[in-house]
Image (cartoon, helix red, strand yellow):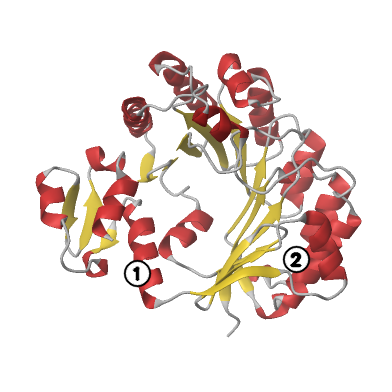
């Protein structure tokens, strides 16, 4: 039987580099070309594409929708020729407003994508300016409507909260605008200051603040709002209409194997994890020369897998199996504090505990 995995493609190109983003990315320059696409397809061959059957496909970045129609078609058709796509149940592309028109949106749909994750971040001009985004609120609304017109029935919006200058009223306005559009999925991420970003430098210099009380207040506002609007809060940062949860992300949280292609992508297969060389020009040269692009390789121990499973599954609505805990642990005190509850043989974060998912997982590790 052909092994089932989850396939991730990293497209590192961005028209504009957002100052908060910690992912590997850069402006296209001359690198968004046929040689880049052919390198990904060659890497797929090297990783055994013809012996793998992806269950989900996810194009992340970067900004996948920034690729030209010609390159998108070459890449998406090339992948379908190399992998057995007969079992694919979800095919997602990340997109940013103002990087596609109706014709390109229809092309993405025709080539197999059935789900789009639209990077809006905010519908407020002042917040978009703070984040360094190069689209307007009107661009975001127009992009969403264009995707609907192109035939996409599974649309997600990415929003961010606890941004310096963002108060409860501005966040509430974002939530209400998102609900008016009626997406099937919403991801609401708490701003974090990532390594090697302009935002981290400004935070360290005192120019940008952080506030745990604000984090919690805006988190709970989003949870109450979307649950009241009929969405399922199925993971700390994710909400979905029933039946529209991200299958690809659920695979990550459950510990399933995934193969990452493209510069900067991470893979976990058969207890091994590696990162693909995070340098687009060097990546293309290496693949073309037949050189392995895997770096930072590690074999995951049973303890590594236990800790990861606990941290990831605790973030979900279903929680984590209690068997993942080792003695001694502070579970009973966390239950008494009202942060965790038992549900059969699983431990689940309460509404109050969700805002503290990471520190709670650390205490239980």
Q: Examine the rendered structure and indicate whether residue 21 appears above or below residue 80.
A: above
Q: Residues within 10 Å of mark 2 (few under 14, many from 20)?
A: some
Comparing 192 with 138, the one in front is 192
Q: Quadrant of residue 277?
A: bottom right
**Residue hosting label 2:** 80
Going by the image, does 11 lie left or right of 281?
A: left
Seen from this angle, which residue lies furthest bottom? Answer: 1
**Residue 318 visible (yes or no):** no
Q: Position of residue 92 (x, y in %)?
A: 62, 51
Which of the marked residues, 2 or 1, is nearer the chain's N terminus? 2
**Residue hosting label 1:** 306
Q: Examine the rendered structure and indicate whether residue 363 appears above or below residue 130.
A: below
Seen from this angle, which residue lies furthest front? Answer: 205
Q: CA distance from mark 2 to mark 1?
A: 34 Å
Depth-wise, is mark 2 or mark 1 nearer the camera? Answer: 1
Comparing 211 with 253, the one in front is 211
Q: Secondary structure at mark 2?
A: helix
Identify the residue shown where x is 24% and y is 58%.
364
Q: Examine the rendered structure and indicate whether residue 288 appears above or below residue 2.
A: above
Identify the residue shown where x is 61% and y is 42%.
196
**Residue 314 visible (yes or no):** yes
């Amino acid at each position: 039987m052909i092994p089932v995995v989850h396939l991730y493609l990293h497209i590192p190109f961005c028209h504009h580099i957002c100052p908060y983003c910690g992912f590997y990315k850069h402006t296209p320059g001359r690198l968004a070309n046929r040689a880049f696409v052919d390198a990904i397809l060659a890497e797929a061959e090297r990783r055994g594409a013809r012996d793998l059957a992806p269950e989900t496909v996810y194009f992340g970045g970067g900004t996948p929708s920034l690729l030209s129609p010609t390159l998108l078609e070459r890449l998406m058709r090339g992948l379908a020729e190399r992998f057995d796509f007969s079992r694919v149940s979800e095919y997602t592309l990340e997109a940013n407003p103002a990087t596609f028109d109706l014709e390109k949106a229809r092309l993405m749909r025709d080539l197999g994508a059935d789900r789009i994750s639209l990077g809006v971040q905010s519908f407020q001009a002042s917040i978009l300016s703070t984040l360094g985004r190069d689209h307007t609120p009107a661009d975001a609304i127009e992009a969403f409507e264009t995707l609907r017109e192109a035939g996409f029935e599974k649309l997600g919006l990415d929003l961010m909260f606890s941004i310096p200058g963002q108060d409860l009223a501005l966040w509430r306005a974002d939530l209400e605008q998102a609900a008016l559009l009626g997406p099937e999925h919403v991801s609401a991420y708490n701003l974090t200051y990532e390594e090697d970003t302009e935002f981290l430098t400004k935070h360290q210099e005192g120019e940008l603040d952080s506030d745990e009380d604000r984090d919690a207040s805006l988190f709970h506002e989003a949870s109450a709002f979307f649950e009241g609007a009929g969405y399922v809060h199925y993971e700390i940062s994710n909400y979905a209409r029933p039946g529209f949860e991200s299958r690809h992300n659920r695979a990550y949280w459950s510990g399933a194997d995934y193969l990452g292609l493209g510069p900067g992508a991470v893979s976990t297969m058969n207890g091994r994890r590696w990162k693909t060389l995070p340098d687009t020009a060097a990546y293309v040269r290496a693949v073309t020369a037949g050189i392995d692009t895997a770096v930072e390789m590690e074999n995951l121990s049973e303890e590594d897998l236990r800790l990861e499973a606990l941290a990831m599954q605790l973030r979900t609505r279903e929680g984590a199996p209690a068997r993942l805990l080792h003695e001694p642990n502070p579970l009973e005190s966390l239950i008494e504090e009202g942060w965790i509850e038992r549900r059969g043989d699983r431990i689940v974060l309460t509404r109050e505990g969700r805002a503290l998912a990471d520190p709670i997982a650390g205490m239980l590790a």
